Amino acid sequence: MTDDKFARVITWAGGQHTFNLNHPWVRNVLKYRGIHGANGNTPAACLLRFETGTYSIEDIERVLELGLIGGGMDKQSADSLLDQHVRGKPIATLAVTAVQVLETIFIGAPQ
C-alpha cells in the first residue's frame, strides 16, 4: 500500500489496483478537462451524478481510468483493463467502484 492518503487500493478486475485522483497529473487533467456531464465537469458534479443516479458509462470509465493512471498504471495498461472489465459490461457494480474511487478525493482513503 502507498503512503498517499488519497490513494486507495481496491480489489477489482481480478486483482488489487491502486487508484489515486489526487496525483498531480490527474489533478491537472481534472482542472482543465474535468469529467464532462450534467451539472458540470468537476469531481463534485460527477459525484452528484452518481448520488442521483444520473451518471453515465463515460463517468465510470473516466473516473476509473484517471484513478488507475494516478495510482501508477500507464495509460495503455489502464485502457486495456477498461476494455476487459468495463466497456460493454453491466454498469451497476462498476458504478460502486467508481464512487469508491471518486469519494476518496473528498474524504481520503480508508485507514
Image: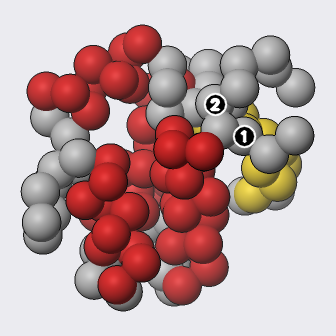
* Alpha carbons under labels 2 and 1: distance apart: 5 Å
**Can you tell which quarter of the image residue 44 is in?**
bottom left
Residue located beneath label 1 in the image: 109
Mark closest to the chain's N terminus, 2 or 1: 2
Q: Look at the image and tell me in which quarter the N terminus lies.
A: top right
Label 1, secondary structure: give it: loop
Q: Amino acid at mark 1?
A: Ala
Q: Residue at x 63, y 30 (%)?
A: 6
Indicate the position of residue 49 as horizontal and vertical percent values: 30, 73
Q: Is residue 84 visible?
A: no
Whether residues under marks 2 and 1 lie with C-beta atoms below 8 angstroms apart, the answer is yes
Camera-side residue of 50 and 13: 50
Q: Quadrant of residue 99?
A: bottom right
Checking the image for residue 6, the label placed there is 2
| Relative vertical location of residue 38 with respect to residue 14 in this rendering, above or below | below
Position of residue 67 relative to residue 37, above or below, is: above
Report the residue at 12% width, 66% height from top.
39
Q: Secondary structure at mark 2?
A: loop
Residue 6, relative to residue 17: is it above or below?
above
Please state which of residues 38 and 11 is positioned toward the viewer in this rendering. Answer: 38
Where residue 110 sits in the image (x, y, percent)?
Answer: 80, 45
Residue at x-position 34% and y-position 84%:
52
Which label sits on residue 98?
none
Q: Which amino acid type is shown beneath numbered disc 2?
A: Phe
Q: For this view, does 20 lie left or right of residue 91?
A: right
Numbered circles on residues, count = 2
